[in-house]
Amino acid sequence: MINYFFTYIDKIPKELHNSLFSSQHLLALGMVALTWIIIILLFKDKAVESKWKAVKWMALTLPVLEAAQMLWYKSIGEFSWGYTLPLHLCSLMSVLLPVMAFTRNRLLQEYSYAIGMAPALMTLLTPDVYYYPSLSFIYLQTMLVHGIICLIPLFMVFCMGFRPDIRRLPKVVGLLVCFAVLIVPVNYITDGNYFFLRYPAPGSPMEGFSQMVGSPWYLVPTLMLGCVLWFAFYLPFVLIEFVASRKKSADMLQNEAVEEEKPALMR
């Protein structure tokens, strides 16, 4: 299998092709999740600046991996202006996450959690290169890139005290829409499919949606799936804030009651 590490899928024997949720795929997912846990535990008690330095290094790994992917496609004669530029929803994070890491911009932090993590997690579960063997460059590159895109917001939540705020979600969605609008003419010029605006990614839930409602209407249930994921991602923090607010109100009422009792006790 290692002999086909840099080989394009058309030249790899079919008996070596991978499949979704095969033992190879599940092993890769387990290794990605284990890496998340190890890195979070290693940095949990480090100083804040050390944690930001780690975020910067993780973020800077992304453009390197994206450049390596483009060079690979170029070397095998499969480079395409309509596919291999870092303009997909996830590959765009190779630009946005380094900017976020160095500027510490709060909106981009929220974007990395809400927009970066959901599609990256879905790609880990249903990678569009799932048919490649696990021991192939493009498969490992895909798992690494999307693993890092998920790791950075998880790292900020569990190591750095970052708390996603659902009140910022409309601004985040607005930023996503702006990017999508800019991508439309790029798709037209390059005959590309960035942001999967023209047809779904193979093996993804979008492909199933497309079979049910057609194209481009598959984008509607895709958005609905995104809303379900956002609900799951934000619900714990909404509940934490609600409980903290109720506790604060109860403490204030208790303090007021104590203050009212003080004059009576002094009589």
Image (cartoon, rainbow, N blue to C red):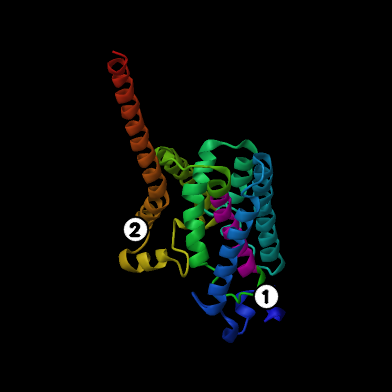
Q: Quadrant of residue 171?
A: top left
Q: Quadrant of residue 84?
A: bottom right
Q: Report if the CB atoms under discs 2 and 1 are less than 8 Å apart.
A: no
Instruction: State the extent of the magenta-drawn residues as a range.
Output: 138-155
- Answer above or below: position of 133 versus 239: below
Residue pointed to by mark 2: 221
Query: Which residue appears farthest toward the front when viewing the image?
Result: 267
Tell me which amino acid carries mark 1. Thr
Which residue is located at x 61 percent, y 84 percent? 13
Name the one closer to the observer, 200 or 170: 170
- The answer to whether 231 appears left or right of 95 in the picture is left
Q: Is residue 148 highlighted in magenta?
A: yes
| Image location (x, y in percent) of residue 188 | 50, 52
Residue pointed to by mark 1: 7
Q: Quadrant of residue 4?
A: bottom right
Name the one closer to the observer, 264 or 67: 264
- Answer above or below: position of 167 versus 124: above
- The answer to whether 233 appears left or right of 101 in the picture is left
Image depth: mark 2 or mark 1 in front = 2
| Image location (x, y in percent) of residue 42 | 65, 54
